[in-house]
């Protein structure tokens, strides 16, 4: 009646995690989330990185960084290349996930605490139940932590490096031998070519994140802005939680693992923030694809096929997109990625490598969502004004002219 020994042990671990967390620790029990994620990857098989694998990854990242020197003016971004296990990926990236997920989780936990403890109680009773409400919010923190832990554990089983979702999850360029092997499964391409192609993508991302000073804060700030605009559908959340049978562990697992607790409804504010965020992410991914294709041309015979494989994964909503949607309520649009890549390629053809990469010099120089829709005007520059007459004496104004509307 109490389940298997494994289920009991898992429940006891989760209960201990809940009791050990401080109410002031934040909206998510991140220690619990990390433990759940690590248990998930260990259960799926997460061997330590062997020395031979580490050497192959380091050599691939270093070679990729050298190749990129030929196709971009941005300096190298691979300083201490590393090879990670899936557990190491979780440990290294949790600090950024915390920054990304806490704004959404805070609202979810607050709403869950009120839903579980304050529904139907008069104000006087709610005031008297203050300690109980704190405990319920702590339970909410545990439940959201479990949801995030499961999502991160699932994502750790699929990623190949630190930059799969286009965000700076780590300051270190790294690939996961297990992730590279999983990506290579079923592909009729030499393993060393696949590894080098993925290393090119990883190294290109880190060039941007390390040498475009404003980009990291811009991307993470855009995600946070989007998350802060989220409003929780309280009635739907009440239906899910109040109908939850705490004696039914399978149903609890289904609710917590299926993304039901982290699907906030969109608002007009979110839609506007989403456009800005999607544009920024698409521009990063589009630039990376452009320089990687250029660096691999003539050197990696399988580069085009591998690029198409990645595009198909994007188009079908790969694991990174699905998990990112679960964590922060955001889905990427693959259509934007293709448009952004076309824009960067056209910029390189029109202005050269120097002119293309100079766009990263300031956020105000970057293309907008409208530019992705109509890239030609951006690539060619604004309408060509005739500046030759600026030094000529002005003609006398006609009667009735004030000069105030002339531009």
Image: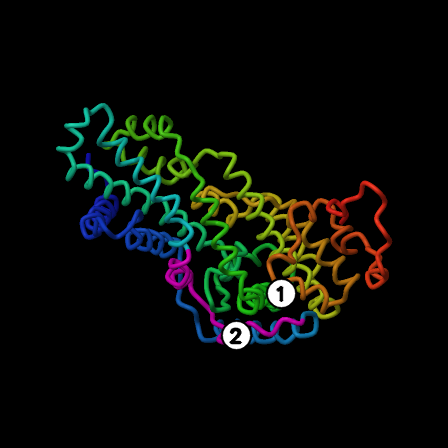
Position of 115 compared to 324: left or right? left
Residue annotated with mark 1: 361
Report which quarter residue 119 is drawn in. Answer: top left
Spot the residue most to the front: 399
| Residue 255 is one of the magenta-drawn residues | no
In front here: 283 or 41? 283
Check the image and tell me how it is coloured.
rainbow
Disc number lying in front (1 or 2): 1
Sequence-wise, the earlier of marks 1 and 2 is 2
Q: Is residue 74 visible?
A: yes
Q: Secondary structure at mark 2?
A: helix
Residue 334 pos. (x, y %): 62, 46
Task: Tell me the quadrant of the picture where the N terminus can be found.
Answer: top left
Q: Position of residue 113 (x, y in %)?
A: 26, 36
Q: Which mark is residue 282?
A: none
* Magenta stretch in the rendered image: 73-96
Q: Which residue is mark 2?
A: 58
Query: Which of these two is toward me, 401 or 136?
Result: 401
Closer to the camera in the image, 202 or 319: 202
Q: Rate crowding at label 2 as few (under 14), some (14 to 19) or many (20 or more) other CA atoms within 10 Å.
A: many
Extreme residue in the left direction: 128
Q: Is residue 301 visible?
A: no
Looking at the image, residue 66 sits to the left or right of residue 394; the answer is left
């Amino acid at each position: 009646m109490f389940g298997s020994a494994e289920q009991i042990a898992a429940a006891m671990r989760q209960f201990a995690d809940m009791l050990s967390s401080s109410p002031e620790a934040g909206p998510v029990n991140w220690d619990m989330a990390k433990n759940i994620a690590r248990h998930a990857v260990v259960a799926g098989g997460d061997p330590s990185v062997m020395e031979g694998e580490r050497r192959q990854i380091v050599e691939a990242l270093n070679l990729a960084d050298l190749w990129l020197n030929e196709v971009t003016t941005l300096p190298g971004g691979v300083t201490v290349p590393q090879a990670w296990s899936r557990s190491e990926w979780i440990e290294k990236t949790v600090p950024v996930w915390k920054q990304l997920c806490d704004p959404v989780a805070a609202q979810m936990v607050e709403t869950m605490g009120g839903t579980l403890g304050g529904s139907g109680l008069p104000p006087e009773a709610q005031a008297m139940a203050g300690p109980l409400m704190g405990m319920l919010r702590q339970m909410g923190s545990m439940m959201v932590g479990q949801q995030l832990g499961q999502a991160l554990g699932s994502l750790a089983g699929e990623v190949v490096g630190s930059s799969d979702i286009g965000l700076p999850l780590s300051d270190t360029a790294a690939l996961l031998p297990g992730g590279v092997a999983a990506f290579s499964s079923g592909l009729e391409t030499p393993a060393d070519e696949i590894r080098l192609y993925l290393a090119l993508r990883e190294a290109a991302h880190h060039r941007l994140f390390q040498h475009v000073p404003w980009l990291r804060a811009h991307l993470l700030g855009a995600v946070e802005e989007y998350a802060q605009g989220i409003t929780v559908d309280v009635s739907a959340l009440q239906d899910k939680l109040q109908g939850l049978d705490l004696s039914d562990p399978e149903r609890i697992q289904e609710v917590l693992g299926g993304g039901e607790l982290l699907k906030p409804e969109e608002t007009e504010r979110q839609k506007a923030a989403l456009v800005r965020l999607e544009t920024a992410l698409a521009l990063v991914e589009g630039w990376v694809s452009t320089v990687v294709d250029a660096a691999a041309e003539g050197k990696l015979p399988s580069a085009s096929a591998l690029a198409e494989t990645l595009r198909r994964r994007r188009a079908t909503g790969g694991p990174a997109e699905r998990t990112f949607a679960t964590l922060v309520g955001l889905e990427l649009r693959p259509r934007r990625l293709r448009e952004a890549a076309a824009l960067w390629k056209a910029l390189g053809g029109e202005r050269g490598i120097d002119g293309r990469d100079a766009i990263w010099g300031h956020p105000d120089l970057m293309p907008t969502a409208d530019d992705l829709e109509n890239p030609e005007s951006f690539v060619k520059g604004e309408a060509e004004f005739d500046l030759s007459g600026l030094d000529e004496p002005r003609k006398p104004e006609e009667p009735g002219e004030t000069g105030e509307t002339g531009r």
